[in-house]
Amino acid sequence: MKIHWLTAVLAVAVLALGSSSANASLLTPGSPSNVVPPDPDLFSLATSTIKADTGVEAFTPTAGGLTGSFREVVVQETAGANILGGLTFVYQFLDSTVDVGRMASNNWTSPPANSPVDVGSNVGTAANSLLGHAGDVNTTTVDWNTNGTLGFNFATTVGPGQYSWLLIIRTSNTQWGGANITLLDGGASASVTGFSPAAVPEPSTMAIAGLGALGLIGYGIRRRRGA
C-alpha cells in the first residue's frame, strides 16, 4: 500500500513539472540555441515579491551611439508560477536610437550554482510591465554559453521607440548578485548593470566554514581560561 501511495505522489509531481506555467524551455550551459516561441507566459508583478530592482536605467553606450532605457527585477513568484521554487529574473528595455538584436547577461555560471533555468516571455501591459508599456518585439531564441553568458536574441530587431517584451528567466536559485547586461546589434552596443543568480555554498563548504568558526570559538575560550 505504501508503494502505491509513493507512486501516486511521484506521478503528481511529474504532471506538475510537465504543466509548468512557464515555457518549459529548460536550458543547460552549452546549449547553442533554444527556441522561445511567442509566449504569453503568465507573469504578474502584483502577485510577486520584489527582492531586487535596478530601477529605470539609461544605457551606457559603448559603440555606435546605442541609447535607451532598461529595468530588471528579481522576484519571488508564487509556487504555481515558478515550480522550480527559486527566484525569477525579469527584464525589459526601450530602444531609443539604434536597433537592438540581442540582450545578454553575464555571471550565469554552470550548475549547481543556478540550475535548472526555465525561460519565457510576456507581452505585458502598461500596468504589468517594468517600463509602463506593453512589449512590441518578442525574443525568438535564447542561448547559454559555457562562459556564463545567457542571451536573448530577436529575429526582428527592437527598433527606435520600441519596447522589448518582458524577458523572463525562472530559476531554482535563491540568491542573486550583480551582473553586466549588454545590448547590441551589428556595430552598436551598450551596457547597463543588473542581476544574475549567485552561487549557493555547497554543504561541504558550509560545514568546513562552521568547523572553522567553532575552532576559533574554542581557541578564544581556552585563551580566556589560561589568562
Image: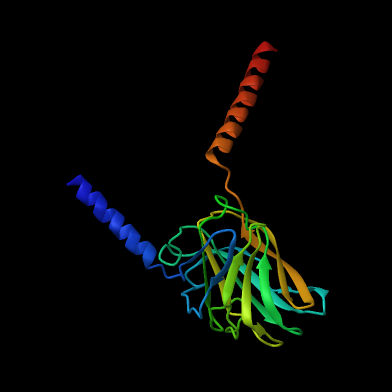
Q: How is the image coloured?
A: rainbow
- On the image, which quarter does residue 90 sit in? bottom right
Vertical arrangement, residue 156 with respect to residue 181, above or below: below
Indicate the position of residue 111 as horizontal and vertical percent values: 56, 52
Farthest left residue in view: 1
Q: Which of the image's four quarters has the C terminus?
A: top right
148 on left or right of 116? right
Indicate the position of residue 40 as horizontal and vertical percent values: 48, 79
Give the mark count: 0
Q: Residue at x 58, y 83 (%)?
A: 135
Farthest top residue in view: 226
Indicate the position of residue 83 as horizontal and vertical percent values: 43, 62
Indicate the position of residue 194 as horizontal and vertical percent values: 68, 64
Q: Which of 150 and 166 lies nearest the eye of the viewer?
A: 150
Q: Residue at x 82, y 79 (%)?
A: 64
162 on left or right of 122? right
Task: Say if residue 55 shows up in the picture.
Answer: no
Vertical arrangement, residue 74 with respect to residue 221, above or below: below
Q: Which of 73 and 3 lies nearest the eye of the viewer?
A: 3
Task: Say if residue 195 shows up in the picture.
Answer: yes
- On the image, which quarter does residue 13 sit in? bottom left
